[in-house]
Amino acid sequence: MANGSDWYHQRHIAAPAFMGERLKSYAGLMVECTKKMLQSLQNAVESGQTEVEIGEYMTRVSADIISRTEFDSSYEKGKQIFHLLTELQSLCHQATRHLCLPGSRFFPSNYNRQIKSKKMEVDRLLLEIIQSRKDCVEIGRSSSYGNDLLGILVNEMEKKRSDGFNINLQLIMDECKTFFFAGHETTALLLTWTVMLLASNPSWQEKVRAEVNEVCNGETPSIDHLSKFNLLNMVINESLRLYPPATLLPRMAFEDIKLGDLHVPKGLQIWIPVLAIHHSEEIWGKDANEFNPDRFASKPFAPGRHFIPFATGPRNCIGQSFAMMEAKIILAMLISQFSFHISDSYRHAPVVVLTIKPKYGVQVYLKPLNS
């Protein structure tokens, strides 16, 4: 984890990709990826498959969106990178289920060899994409490194370099991996849990559908529509409260701190228990473990203290606006095309594996609304 001036410069390199007009420009791409996913669901239903594991579709569409926003003009190679990163993520999840001995990551085991090999292949592919774009700029075939996330990062890197701050390609490659790990699985899980909650609460599903139909009036959701999805926003926030993307937030004290009677010494690692805070009856009331989006109609809680799905402060999630925009577009399009209710085969078993996952998936019955 970077700190001090290193963190500051890294943050400022990545920030332009998630701000203003640049952020808004991703909406059309998100819509197109969602259309493909909805067509897949339609095909499944038409083939006689009325029950689907919705998490598979949410994982696919979020991967497609992050692939296209990050590597638009190098999409095919980007898909190879994300396939390798998915395998790496799976290997890391396996590691959390085993006893790790000090220094075990240096053992010449098959597991460690797999991780090393996949990391090297990811770096090789990323370097190829970056180098090819740099070559195009140098020979005059292109005036920029691209308008996707990778291009923005390289453009910002060159600006910083001209200002005398040395940034190497490894930092850019690491940022690309961070975008994937931070923005792929977490968004897919947010979507999956939200569909589960709406499928289990048909009255709220109808309310949200009515709102989407009224706001969009038959049109595809646009940037202008998103701020008007008040009920959908409440439902997404309640989903984030019940099933936050990160159950714990690691932090470290960089100086001695006095909090009331509590002394926090410099260097102490602190873990903020997000899941416990989000389910605290003292904060949220006796129904803290129940689905009640109405609690977000007003704000009796303190944002940044009691509700922290994207962390808070200067180290909050840089992509939170991207994630919320993506979730609103996908859910609005899904709910306007399909009705869904929870399957009899669904087993509610949230399990914490870095994030909160449905252990057995989320099975729902789908019904096209235009049939």
Image (tube, rainbow, N blue to C red):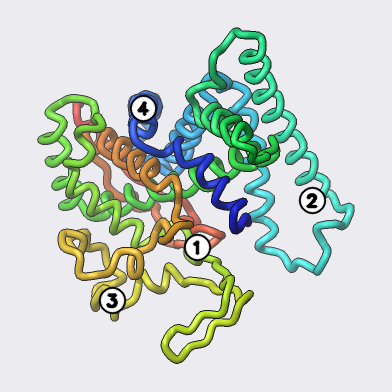
The disc at residue 283 is 3
Residue 44 visible in this rendered orientation of the protein: no
Q: Secondary structure at mark 3?
A: helix
Q: Nearer the viewer, residue 223 or 235?
A: 223
Mark 4 or mark 2, whichever is nearer to me: 4
The answer for how far apart the CA atoms under marks 2 and 3 are is: 44 Å
Amino acid carrying label 4: it is Ser
Q: Position of residue 86 (x, y in %)?
A: 61, 41
Question: Which of disc 2 and disc 4 is earlier in sequence?
Answer: 4
Residue furthest bottom as drawn: 261
Above or below: residue 341 compared with residue 224: below
Q: Nearer the viewer, residue 306 or 49?
A: 306
Amino acid carrying label 3: it is Ile
**Which residue has dot 4 on it?**
25
Q: Secondary structure at mark 1?
A: strand
**Which residue has dot 1 on it?**
351
